Image (cartoon, rainbow, N blue to C red):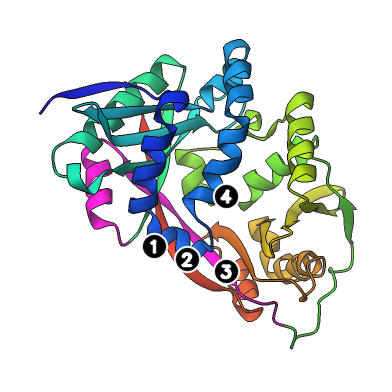
Amino acid sequence: MLRTLRALDLRKDLDGVARIAATCFRDELERRGTTIGATVRPLRTWLPLLCLAARFSKYVRDRMAGAVSIDDGRIASFVLMKPMGRETSQWYVGPVATDPACQRRGHGRAALEEAMALAKKRGAGFALLDVRDENVAGIALYESAGFSRYDSVALMRADAIAGDHEALALPVGCVLRTLRLSDWRTRYRVALAETPQAVLDRVPPHEREFRFPAWERLILALSARISRARIRRYAVLADSLPRAWGSVRAERNGRHSIALHVALDDAEQLAAPLLDLLLSHLGTGACRSIQTRVRATAGPLLNALSSRGFRIVERYERLGRVL
């Protein structure tokens, strides 16, 4: 076996990466109601512009980072990764996949170690990733590579909005306002308030993870306009302090998504009213599915979502490694 390890080059590797991902993540993509083709087509369209931007911007270049293991001229395994924000030492790793025909030959471990070495050279000090809890072999691989579990995440989905409940109002004293993408401080403060202390002690969020420069906000706005997606963001304040925020993205294909972030001390009071507000922007006519990701230990959020028709479709273990 002739193995070669190198940094990912999307111009050369996109087809090989898509081929492996289509095979390895078929069931997961079906549960999410999408395909690799739906992800690759717009990426292929924008790839020349992204590659040009990467020549001048470290931020763009880092978000296209990864590593591949080559077996006799063919991609056998790939690892994608990106920084969690601007000028941050925390990097997110994934997806990670190996061609079924090349499994159990060390390609996945080799590509992962190459990716970690590349990330460290680019300034990463901590790497984190999510792996499905039933993927015992994957968890064992990551733990043997120095990763350890410190959190868990649940992917929840509803095929329709439950309409047999009365929409709840925010508690007295709470103020609702529109949240601008530029208002990173609100999102950062809520992140600190919603994260369990054990996770804060291990991997505290950093304010740099939440900042979006003006040019990136413009790109996100243009992307939403091109895809005809409607996005609404709201923050909830109590005594002038941010206690929760949420967003809803309504897609023209009827597959929508929401984000729900609530301070631990206020979750019992704010989770359901904020969720009702977000769902009110979707309606029921063209809705095919709604999905969201929440911490698997966030009881009030899970209860509010479950009572409105959401169910857990995937559970993930979150693992981290100091580089």
| CA–CA distance in space, label 3 to label 1 | 15 Å
> Circles 1 and 2: CB distance less than 8 Å?
yes
> Circles 3 and 2: CB distance less than 8 Å?
yes
Kind of residue sitting beneath label 2? Arg
Reply yes or no: does residue 137 show up in magenta.
Answer: yes
Q: Is residue 42 left or right of residue 272?
A: left
Q: Nearer the viewer, mark 3 or mark 4?
A: 3
Q: Earlier in the sequence, mark 1 or mark 4?
A: 1
| CA–CA distance in space, label 3 to label 2 | 9 Å
Q: Is residue 62 left or right of residue 268?
A: left
Q: Residues within 10 Å of mark 4 (few under 14, many from 20)?
A: many
Kind of residue sitting beneath label 3? Arg
Kind of residue sitting beneath label 1? Asp
Q: In terms of secondary structure, where does tag 1 sit?
A: helix
| CA–CA distance in space, label 1 to label 2 | 6 Å
Residue that mark 4 sits on: 195
Residue 307 is situated, as x and y percent measured from the top left of the image, at 64, 80
Residue that mark 3 sits on: 157
| CA–CA distance in space, label 1 to label 4 | 30 Å
Q: Nearer the viewer, mark 3 or mark 2?
A: 2
Q: Nearer the viewer, mark 4 or mark 2?
A: 2
